[in-house]
Amino acid sequence: MSESEPKTVLLIEFGPTQIEAIDAWVERHPDPKPTREEAVCLLIIGRLGAEEGHPSTPIPGFVTGRDIV
């Protein structure tokens, strides 16, 4: 998403297991590491295939913190 595009704020609740999975995903990235918010956006964009313009394959291990393949 470019900086000039309008943005919508979403309030999403995650449980402790999901937060641990997101934090584990973040820790596997080199510095500068994404924030939790950036990580969630990257995971969603990857899942939706938004950058390629078509749906991607499912992420079976999202809650376990496995990377998108």
Image: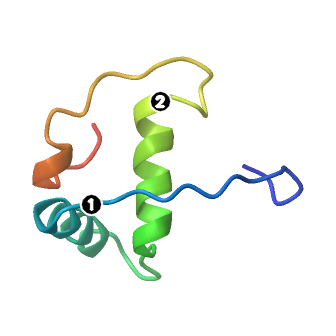
Give the number of the mark in front: 2 or 1.
Answer: 1
How packed mark 2 is, by other alpha carbons closer than 10 Å (few <14, some 14-19, many 20 or more), is: some
Amino acid at dot 2: Leu
> Viewer-proximal residue, 2 or 16?
16
| Residue at figure coordinates x 36%, y 75% from the top left | 30
- Give percent across and percent down for residue 36: 40, 71
Q: Nearer the viewer, residue 20 or 34?
A: 20
Q: Determine which residue is flagged by label 2.
A: 48
Reading the image, the residue beneath label 1 is 14
Q: Position of residue 8 (x, y in %)?
A: 69, 52
Relative placement, left or right, of 13 versus 15 is right
Secondary element under disc 2, as helix, strand or loop, is helix
Residue 58, located in which quarter of the rendered image?
top left
Instruction: Name the disc covering residue 28, or none.
Output: none
Q: In the image, is residue 8 above or below residue 61?
A: below
Tell me where residue 47 sits by quadrant.
Answer: top left
User: On the rendered structure, is 63 left or right of 14?
Assistant: left
Q: Quadrant of residue 33?
A: bottom left
Q: Is residue 14 above or below residue 64?
A: below
The quarter of the picture where the C terminus appears is: top left
Viewer-side residue, 49 vs 18: 18
Colouring used for the render: rainbow
Q: Callout 1 environment at 10 Å: few (<14), some (14 to 19), or many (20+)?
A: few
Mark count: 2
Report the residue that reaches farthest toward the top: 54
Q: Is residue 16 above or below residue 7?
A: below
For marks 2 and 1 on the same chain, the one whose residue lies earlier in the sequence: 1
Mark 1 lies on a secondary structure that is: loop
Residue in view at x 47 percent, y 52 percent: 42
Kind of residue at badge 1 = Phe
Q: Label 2 to label 1, Cα distance in Å? A: 19 Å
